[in-house]
Amino acid sequence: LHARLTVDPAHPVGPVSRRLFGAFVEHMGRSVYGGIYEPGHPAADEDGFRRDVIDLVREMGVTTVRYPGGNFVSGFRWEDGVGPRDERPVRLNLAWHSTETNEVGLHEFAAWLEKVGAELMLALNLGTRGTLEALDLLEYANVPSGTTLADQRIRNGRREPFDVRMWCLGNEMDGPWQLGQRSAEDYGKLAARTAKAMRQVDPDLELVACGSSGASMPTFGEWERTVLSHAYDDVDFISCHAYYEEEDGDLGSFLASAKDMDRFIETVTATADRVKAVRRSPKRINISFDEWNVWYLSRVPADLAKRIDDWPLAPPISEDPYTVADGVVVGSLLMSLIRHADRVTSASIAQLVNVIAPIAAEPQGPAWRKSTFFPFAVTSRLARGVALRVGVDGPTYDTAAHGEVPVVDAAATTDAGRAALFLVNRSQTDDVEVSIYVSALGTSTIEEALTLSDPDPHAANTADRQDRVGPRRNDSAALADGALRILLPPVSWSAVSLR
Ligand code: AHR
């Protein structure tokens, strides 16, 4: 098969925010306890954080981390996680039917983020708590000193404020599974009230209102419209959440998941702009795609311990193995985010360690990279500057889930004499020879060409074979007569960097 692509710096989409390469750490399963934090592990540092995990998070190029949930946050009292550790209460984690020891809270997580070099994006409990508790946490975190809460933070070991910029006003408040689920009307009013109150403390915060917890929710669209009709003037972002999995062996549909993400982003953008038009507002609401990934939700056992006498500590949940095909889809979801860089200015792969995660941390054992780690790490490293529109002229195929889709998917960025191209071949049988006219980019050398693929698209890394799959050099890439030519193997994700 052949495909011809065009890319032109005269057609920029918008700047690629570094916050697109965010992740998510929730108090869920072995994400925090037994994930980032395992005192007694040979690689643990003086604070109990695993150095091997920190190294991998840095290598992955994670810029922002959303914390502490997720569904967990809707039952969380932030005060439980601060102060002397031996006085912290042990609580039920109702979202994930487990025990929360509160050994890791705001101070510890912020310290971990400093080691990792990433920004904190803090989620508020607007499920079982309200505006006052949100204000208390904001005062504790961001006010320099001189109030009871600010001084309590200082006594708890943190002189400088945490200065948290991004705040999520609750989590998935439309979901029947959410503690304190609300109607769009109720939530929209609560989000607006809370945002206004928070801005009285700090007007420059960046605030995210909850969008739908997925595009398949019955209230999708109407939820966003109603919430924003109340909160438009008070918030900066509306959130999107999407998880994809290969269902019933339909690999063709799964490989085209980015088609769904494109449509999702464009629908939410249009809905936000509709509210903008009605209000005649000069302000633009952007998208925080703060949960996205491949997640084998259908494999989560329905009989997850639910007994009143059984609240396990950090039980393993959703430690998906992740295949090459999953890695290819993760790469293409990142391409969808880049294609919409003008409106998606923050995003978090959900999650980061062990739970729905690109990084595995074995108890008392090694930390290693799953297939999904690689496209994230490479894209975070190479996708700099401005996203460009890419024209694709090539073959298509039919899918049950998304209709007719292009075999080749693409995204591009350019930055100060450098350019990066991201390419996916969704064909399960054929190589695609791609030619891209790149002369307008002003680049003349291929710096790097990498491809993630495998004769078995369901191959995966394991604790015993940690490098079974991964990106390899693509030696077919060549530049001649202003065109880049590269051969994309079946079910593959590739990145090419030019200078
Ligand atoms: O990431 C796992 C869960 O997925 C989160 O807690 C929730 O927000 C979403 O439903």
Image (tube, grey):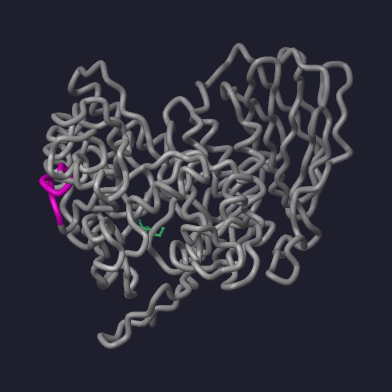
Give the quadrant of residue 460.
bottom right
Say which residue appears at 17% left-offset and 41% top-offset: 191
Percent across and percent down for residue 129 are 14, 55
Above or below, comparing residue 442 to residue 488 in the picture: above
Left or right position of 152 against 474: left
Give the quadrant of residue 74.
bottom left
Percent across and percent down for residue 312 are 37, 80
Q: Tell me the chief SS of the magenta region.
A: helix
Q: Quick check: is 133 in the magenta stretch?
A: yes
Viewport quadrant of the N terminus? top right
Per the rendered image, the range of residues in magenta is 129-135
Left or right position of 8 against 158: right
Say which residue appears at 74% left-offset and 49% top-offset: 452
Q: Nearer the viewer, residue 339 or 385?
A: 385
Say which residue appears at 53% left-offset and 68% top-offset: 319
Please count the marks in the image. 0
Q: Quick check: is 465 in the magenta stretch?
A: no
Percent across and percent down for residue 178 are 25, 61
